[in-house]
Amino acid sequence: MYKILNAFLKINRRWIFLLVLLGVLIPLVLGKGLTRSYPGAEVVKVYDFLNNLEEGDIIILSMDYDPATIPELNPMARALLRQCFNKGIRVVSLTLHPAGPGVVITLVDELLREYSQPGVNPDGSVRPVREYGEDIVFLGYKVGTAVNILALGEDVRLSWPQDYAGVELPAYGSDPTQTTLPLMCDVQNYNDVKCVVTISGTRIPEYWVAYGYQRYHVKVATGCTAVMFADFYPYLQTGQMIGLIPGMKGAADYEELINRPARAMVGMLPQSIVHLMIVGFIILGNIAYFIVRRWEKRGGGDR
Amino acid sequence: MGLRAESRSWGIGIFLVLTLFFIPALASAKEPAPPESGEAKVEAPTPEGETVSPLGYPLNFTAVDNPNDDGMKIKLTWELSPGDQPELGKKENPVKGYRVSRLGPEEAEWQLVTVQPPGIAYFLDEGTEEFPLENDVLYDYKIEVVGEGEILSPPIVQKGIVSSQQFFNTDRINILVCVIAYLCILLFYIFRARKGHELFVRRIAGLDAVDEAIGRATEMGRPILFITGLHDVADISTIAAITILGKVARKTAEYETPLLVPNYDPMVMLVAQETVKQAYLEGGHPDAYSDDMVFFLTTSQFGFVAAVDGIMVREKPATNFYMGYYYAESLILAETGADTGAIQIAGTDSVTQLPFFITSCDYTIIGEELYAASAYLSKEPLQLGSLKAQDFAKVIIGVLMLTGIAATLFGWMWVVDLFIAR
Amino acid sequence: MRREVPVLICAIMGVAMIIQFFIPHPVSQAIYKTVIKWFIIIVTFAMVLGLLSLTRMHLTKLRRGDKDWFFSLVTISSLFVNLLVGFFSFRITDSFIFEGLKVPFNFFTISFATGLAAGSPFMNLFDYIQVPMQATMFSLLAFFIASASFRTFRARTVEATLLLVAALIVMVGRVPVGHMISTSIPALSDWILVNPNMAAKRGIMIGVGLGGISMALKIILGIERSWLGGGGE
């Protein structure tokens, strides 16, 4: 028994890797999933804030992440954009991460393709038509995080004189019928937007709070990876952030709130299984550890 | 100096700083001056025989220069009309909005500035491209309540409003006081340290182990790997990491131990190169330095991690230093390092990565211990002095936090208002 | 002079920007906007420096035939292939972002712009090589966390036990299954996040903030010069 427990404690970690792999793979292959994710209060705050906006209101959506965090952050970005498109909230999207443009272009194209024809959403609601330039503009990436957040407080055209395709932004207040980016006629700085939603796997949301919220008093909501969630909680508690969407669970929560379960919800069962597996490893490891240590203290040893 | 004299210095210091905080802050907490504009008046009185519209007048209409700005802004406030009932919703509310108009000195007609929705009792007029607002020019404002079918209440007018720029943002006096106070504390302790006063710094295990770790690598004849984190050179944790790198490089120069410093940021790489070059010069082995020791990899987070893991597996360093700011890659680095059998010392102010480093590394330097590292390792008076200043400031913050808690409990919100950052 | 001039520039700009923060006058705002533009330009150069440093280092390894020269070849090739494909790949595309493109037609303009459109060769490289590789590296974390937690999470001391129990509760509470097992688990998990976690995080943030102010003031005053390289005062 001692030998078995000792061997268990010294198990080659590749067996653990294999178990984790099976825990993730089996539910995905079998197509089984959870149907509910029980949204947390911090996610509901973001949803409610956007839900209470009027048609035509403008938000800034800053997608500051790279391909590594696509599985966690793309689902929440997708859910947010769907909510905005359904409600008629106009979106100025940008990115402060160098690998962000590729991610954002793919996502925005996908959503615009989905909303290019009138139809019905899977939940039965009407799917309106949304157009680039009218309902969403992608400004692209600019180097320097803090400086661009500060520049947005003065005039977006300081950092982004053109959109990502190279089209000149129209002057603020100009005639929207004379430009292919009519949305930008109504945007100069934070005074013209209702909030900033930043989705990031890094510390960029802290910059948005420090420079955007503190200096210009623009409201900030954050979507982040699960590991960064604990970092941003103090900002939520003080009201410096409207709300928080943490990781894939937060994305699944948001999908449930907009009534459109998608990839994040699919990931909930594998995630739950792996979490329980890790809990099991820890508990079994400790039990084995204490039993082995007790035996060794009693002078047991090889049995 | 005896303990009593030391305590007296602390006491006097705390008293002086608190005085420095509260007196000017109290001065800024006076009641705001009344608006400079003239009396508001109803321009068109109700015709005889007619009853006052049920919309009522928006009372206390004020128009003043917006304070603490660069001018060209006028702040308008009023009380909601008695007829305004936002809770009834847009359709049922008899008040449909508040129409605000402006008349400039050269203008013959009132210009419509805005129609604020019901339930809103303020507006900041910044002018438009067509009708800009200028500084030091007299403007008149009027407000009318809009009802169903565009019926308006008689207007209320404010005459002679002037916008101007300010030279000092009085909302930020509290920040200025805090900055000056901290600067004074910092300079006080630096001068004190320079005069030769001994300043105690507690033991930090991770930093004590640096020499041991370098010695291990030297004995085994294997290189030392030093990573400065994933932030740029403007970040404090990166600067602290580079300071520690300087100390480590000095030792590796003396012991002729190979040193590898892969970098995430090109600017950090340049600074690290200079630091290591200088350290090798001071260590007496300038010829042992090569630019290949300190190199740039990539600014892609996981590309960097993959490259560093590859270096660990191929070069098998005996000692790994992880100093600076890290994200999710911390565990990948630490686990791979543990697998290669290296002794690992981590130091980061990234709270979320600390648990991973604590479980996988032999020593972990937590949060501000990293910033204390340069003072701890060098024992330079300047560094020690600034460390003491930080500690003193933390005591003051603790006292202020307790004060804030008491103030909130007793409803002394003016105390809390003193510290709001605007 | 090599060290004194940067310190002087740093001191002047540092003090000027601190003073600017308290002055709302239009001249102060104009200075602020200009400095932001300068900053954007300077920061962009850092990317160029990094590119040059990377290229030089790997070309040197290739020329000398150092050990692992093959990895240097892969790095350099990937860098230049990506660069060239990005510049010269184009696609008359149905990308919505580039639909409204109204620029004078010339080969480089169209290729530079539309090369970044969805479905172009450059974006295919990004979507089918870079995205899977980076996602794979990130996914390693799940495996490493599982093995690290099994290997090292031992209740050896009181503090370690507290850490362990908190970790178990939060791990179960942050997935839907925790809510299915019992609604108390997510509630307890939230309590841990809102109370002890936040208290500790705030304490460290205050310390980090003070450290940051201290470091910034020392750099502005010229007391801290390690950022220049070479260490010391």
Image: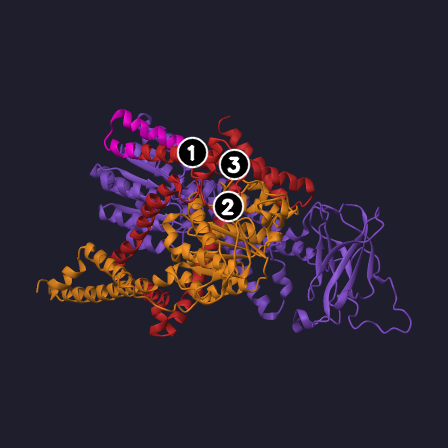
Residue mark closest to the camera, 3 vs 1: 1
Q: Is residue B13 visible?
A: no
Give the chain ID for the red colour.
C
Range of residues picked out in magenta: C50-74
- Please say if A214 is above or below B404: above
> Residue at the right extreme?
B48
Which numbered dot is residue B263?
A: none
Q: Are marks 1 and 2 on the same chain?
A: yes
Which numbered dot is residue C87?
A: 1
Closer to the N terminus: mark 1 or mark 2? 1
Q: Chain of mark 2?
A: C
Q: Secondary structure at mark 3?
A: loop
B146 or B322: nearer the viewer: B146
Give the chain ID for the purple colour.
B
Residue for point 37% across, 65% down: C174
Q: Secondary structure at mark 2?
A: helix
Instruction: Indicate yes or no whether the magenta region holds residue B361.
Output: no
Closer to the N terminus: mark 2 or mark 3? 2
Label 3 to label 1, Cα distance in Å? 44 Å
Where is residue B280 shown, x and y percent of the image?
A: 34, 30
The secondary structure that dominates the magenta segment is: helix
- Please say if A39 is above or below A57: below
Where is residue B197 shown, x and y percent of the image?
A: 47, 44
What coloring was used for the rendering?
Answer: by chain
